[in-house]
Image: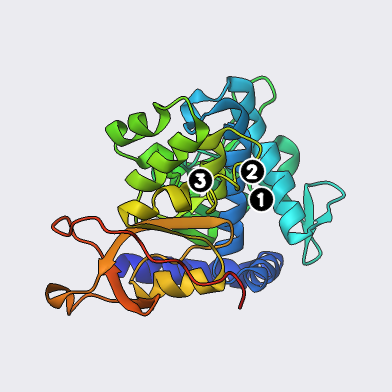
Amino acid sequence: MDVHAALNTALTEQLKRDDAELQAVHAALMGMDPSGERFAGVLRDTIDQLLNGEDTGRYDWKDLYKTERTHAGTLVEINLQRKFEFADGDLMDYRIAGAEVDCKYSQRFGGWMIPPEARGHLCLLVWADDYKSHWSAGLFRVRDEWLNRGTNRDAKLTVKAEHRNKILWLWRDRELPENVLLHMDPADRQAVFEPASGQQRLNELFRRAQKRRISRNVVRTVAQQKDYMKRVRGNGGSRSALKPEGILIMGDYESHCAVARQLGLPVPAEGEFISVRVTKRRPHHQEAPHVELNGQAWVVATDDDLPETAPTLPSHTG
């Protein structure tokens, strides 16, 4: 452990020792979500809710109206309470482990706006940046000496930069589930949105965003149709349309996840898909991970492998 990390660890332990309420809330939240995956899912879903891609086709935070960006903090607060079933606070947003806790979200790290009435209370400070694909959440005891004075009309306060080390981090600089459309190569993204048909747009998405976990919201944004899930499946959807090109589209079924795992690909989480072009295993593929499908061994195709019809994925059951 380097000196900086050791100092941070020592400070964390001191914060816990000096503030029993802070320690109790920290322990309660970590007990609810040790990995932070549920918390990250709420942030991803909230950003997607604001973008409302199915109706607007938007995928970029910059395209939100100012009023929508202002509303983001309220939505994060509401969606976290729904997910974790926090009790209502009497004075602050939540009651966690018997303590009053206010929730503040900012897309700019350090930009949390703390109301004067939160003085003395705990704040759950949340940051998520869709461009960096990272997020953090920590607990902060609101003390005057650690705050910048508010200059805006409602006198909201911010944490002094030199006192951000007083934040007891729950999850620090964690990976936010990727906004695939935002992070695609611009030429590929343009090709995805070019066709007039929602089905053709989805086909292009799965053709160009291979080996990446694609969320249901991305599918919804690209298809912009109420029956978007039908557009992914076989029987006329992308799965059957891309099969002649050798492209498999795996969903979150356990049988599909097992195929992705055996091919060495990211495994789709709930509501996600992953596409990849495959080919029958040949002598030059001997070192590549493979999966047995339709009585043949299949591997992820290389650029040198010619397209061939993909196998049928296993049943959704089991």
Q: Position of residue 178 (x, y in %)?
A: 44, 49
Sequence order check, earlier mark of 3 and 1: 1
Name the residue nearer the viewer: 232 or 65. 232
- Residue that label 1 marks: 123
Q: Position of residue 166 (x, y in %)?
A: 52, 56
Marks 2/1: CA distance?
Answer: 7 Å
- Residue that label 2 marks: 104
Label 2 secondary element: strand
Label 3 secondary element: strand
The number of numbered badges drawn on the structure is 3
**Residue at 35% from the left image edge and 61% from the top image edge:** 310
- Residue that label 3 marks: 128
**Picture layout, residue 147 above or below residue 151:** below
Name the residue nearer the viewer: 13 or 221. 221
**Residue at 58% from the left image edge and 26% from the top image edge:** 56
Sequence order check, earlier mark of 2 and 3: 2
The amino acid type found where label 1 is placed reads: Cys
Marks 2/3: CA distance?
Answer: 11 Å
Which numbered circle lies on residue 268?
none
**Residue at 66% from the left image edge and 27% from the top image edge:** 155
- For residue 191, side relative to residue 125 (left or right): left
**Residue at 78% from the left image edge and 58% from the top image edge:** 86
**Picture layout, residue 128 above or below residue 250:** above
Residue 138: in sight, yes or no?
Answer: no
2 and 3 marks in contact (CB < 8 Å): no
2 and 1 marks in contact (CB < 8 Å): yes
Q: Position of residue 53 (x, y in %)?
A: 57, 33
- The crowd level at tag 3 (other Cα within 10 Å; few <14, some 14-19, many 20+) is many
